[in-house]
Amino acid sequence: MKKRSWFLQSCVVFGLLVTVGQAHAEDEEERVLEVGKWYPTLEGGINLTQSAYSDNWNGGDKGSIVWTAIVNGSLENQLSPKVNSASTLKLAYGQTHQQKQTTDGNRFWDRPEKSTDLIDLESVLRLTLGLVVDPFFSARFESQFQDASDPNGRTLSLNPMKFQETAGIARKFIDEEDRQLLSRVGFSFRQHLRKQFVESPTSAPNPPATDTATNTEFTNDGGLEFVTEYSTKVLQDRVTWNSKFRLFQTIFYSAQNDFDSVTADQWRALGVDPDVVDFNKAPDVDFENIFTTQITKIISVNLYLRWLYDKYDNSVVPTFNDDGELKNVGDIRTATRLGGQFKQTLSIGLTYRFL
């Protein structure tokens, strides 16, 4: 009942948002797309923060360099009077370089650590039949440029990878030049591919950084997904606000039997909450808001807010040795996130709009 309540409450909240959006849009002129014409947008930028101090600086401060490169794009085409295609792309990567201090007071620059990493590509094909709702099909790919989660410092590229296909119904409540509101609900299938380092008996439990052998785990799940996207201009059209809300409720999970094969006492003995067998059934919530204002043609200020609730990362599954013992307890602990995650970034940087 609690899972169903999550879904219904979210639908009610965004139903109210839709009502308010319609009330504000009554006197606005609708956007009209020319059939067969592509409407592309593409912008890229870099945000940089830097500070440095001499060796004899006695204030206790340490230098740092924080940089983030971003690319955002979209492509829309009214392929025919009854078919609309829209795609979005988000790329981001950033690092933090921190200055450290030795016991004798000398400062040095430590190796950079990743601070931002995102690859997100989604395409939505919507049948604009003039009905109350539009049937749609969407495909999405998510990953990151570098997986640096290994405690021994080893990294993997494009890991994990998630593919998602959704079919359902959608409705465009607002479709104006500077304001749009689209909601969709449907059934989704997701496939997760995750590479993991192989821990050989001679190197366990702390394999050396030179041991780079990996295996690949594949899982899939399916469930209901509700998405609402809203974009508008606020503060007298000086700030662009883009918001996206996602709610995914898992119905089936291919690795459920692997979790159920471990008893509650065994989970406790491993230091893992035995309720982990049900964590993958909790709803996933992703609420993202981006506020952007262009100070000059190339200088912009960006405020990024994201609240993410993903109680368990379904790409991580239990793996067992030849004796039937669980051998990736650390990965399961890392994949468990009992609370919501919040990320906030305020930056000023150079942004160039190519299209």
Image (cartoon, rainbow, N blue to C red):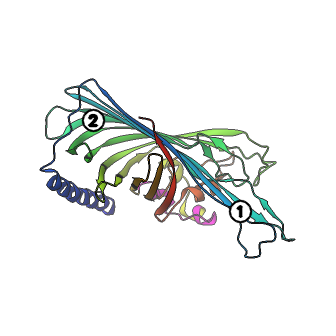
Q: Which residue is mark 2?
A: 136
Q: Amino acid at mark 1?
A: Ala
Residue 132, x across and y down, in percent: 14, 41
- Give, as a single range, the part of the protein colored magenta: 267-281
Q: Secondary structure at mark 2?
A: strand
Q: Is residue 318 above or below residue 85?
A: below
Q: Is residue 159 visible?
A: yes
Residue 257, x across and y down, in percent: 49, 48
Classify residue 254 as left or right of residue 105.
left
Query: CB under 8 Å between callouts 2 and 1?
Result: no
Q: Is residue 317 visible?
A: no
Quadrant occupied by the N terminus: bottom left
Along the viewing direction, whichever of 327 and 154 lies nearer the viewer? 154
Instruction: Assess whether residue 262 is covered by the magenta stretch.
Output: no
Alpha-carbon span between mark 2 and mark 1: 52 Å
Along the viewing direction, whichever of 307 and 304 lies nearer the viewer? 304
Along the viewing direction, whichever of 205 and 298 lies nearer the viewer? 298
Tell me, for residue 52, which label it has, or none. 1
Classify residue 209 as left or right of residue 176.
right
Within 10 Å of disc 2 (Cα), the crowding (few <14, some 14-19, many 20+) is many
Q: Secondary structure at mark 1?
A: loop
Q: For marks 2 and 1, give the one nearer the viewer.
A: 1
